[in-house]
Amino acid sequence: MNISSRFSVAIHILSILEVNKTGTNTSDFIASSVNTNPVVIRRITGMLSKAGLVEVKPGVPGAKLAKDPSDITLLDIYNAVNVVEENGLFGVHDSPNPDCTVGRNIQGVIVPLFTSAQKAMENVLAAVKLQDIIQDIEALEM
Amino acid sequence: MNISSRFSVAIHILSILEVNKTGTNTSDFIASSVNTNPVVIRRITGMLSKAGLVEVKPGVPGAKLAKDPSDITLLDIYNAVNVVEENGLFGVHDSPNPDCTVGRNIQGVIVPLFTSAQKAMENVLAAVKLQDIIQDIEALEM
DNA sequence: CCAACATGTAACTACAATAGTTACAGGAAT
DNA sequence: ATTCCTGTAACTATTGTAGTTACATGTTGG
């Protein structure tokens, strides 16, 4: 299992919108950079739009960032593309047997642990801004 | 997407082995506590056995912990049941276009970030011992 | 005003992982 | 030798992902 590449593709899309901000970034153009189908790009761009990260209008070619890159965190993007449910990173078997000491208590014990493990991961994402990604990309081009 | 419930089931299994250490914990018995099929339990127990966390022999009813509960961390269990590849929590789209500034650099930028996010999550798991789980379960019974 | 072009989205396919199930081979012990 | 258990192969159903085709809808320049 892994977290859907929608997340990494979304970061890729937003990076292009900033790096190539003077150009017209159509789904076809972005798709050729990501190396996928334009419909995949439009689907993800739609999610980013609903989350208020991107501005895009039917019929009007190209998309633009709706916010400054320093106001967008990786966690914002991660939430936008709906790759992991809130407190749902770890699957938990349901309906354990209440007639067993372990069965009737296991969920209450592990769910908070799973939640805090997930939060620790998400906190790392929250600490990185799109701006940092752009800077890293441009630094690699020097 | 979520991380397979094999992980939570494995924690459940190991907890039973400790809490009911004086009894004979067959796959049928454990399955009735987890509320699943005995084969599912045997599959997971097999993984835990390969990882050296459990002792089980063909033909001999029941399984036993191979280590002290204070020497088993949730990370050990997580690794044993193979729910997430090393550095593979986040899926990354492959073959982005090298003719594009973003395309040729995006992977180099995001992979280390993904790795550190994953590690942060795994560090939380590493900090919890099976012994802690057992204590929490028993505390809830008081 | 309409032709050309882009976005939005439904519908379908292929593929992989998960979880449950049946069936049965093989080991252990009374 | 019978009985019970573990190990495992094989199959199913379900779900999520990613790619693709097709087409309706919206915009704009000539």
Image: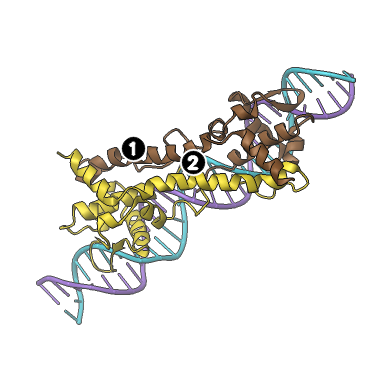
Chain colours: A yellow, B brown, C cyan, D purple
Residue B128 drawn at (x, y percent) = 56, 36
Examine the rendered structure and indicate whether residue D15 appears above or below residue B104: below
Residue B24 drawn at (x, y percent) = 79, 30
Question: Crowding near pointer 2: few (<14 within 10 Å), some, many (20+)?
Answer: some
Question: Crowding near pointer 1: few (<14 within 10 Å), some, many (20+)?
Answer: few
Q: Name the disc covering residue B112, or none.
A: 1
Please name the amino acid that badge 2 sits on.
Met
Please name the amino acid that badge 1 sits on.
Pro
Q: Quadrant of residue D6?
A: top right
Q: Quadrant of residue D25?
A: bottom left
Residue B115 drawn at (x, y percent) = 38, 37
* Figure label count: 2
Q: Quadrant of residue A120?
A: top left
Q: Quadrant of the C terminus of chain A?
A: top left
| Front in this rendered view, residue B13 or C22 | B13
Secondary structure category for the residue under label 2: loop
Q: Nearer the viewer, mark 1 or mark 2?
A: 1
Q: Give the residue pinned by disc 2.
A: A1
Camera sees residue B82: yes
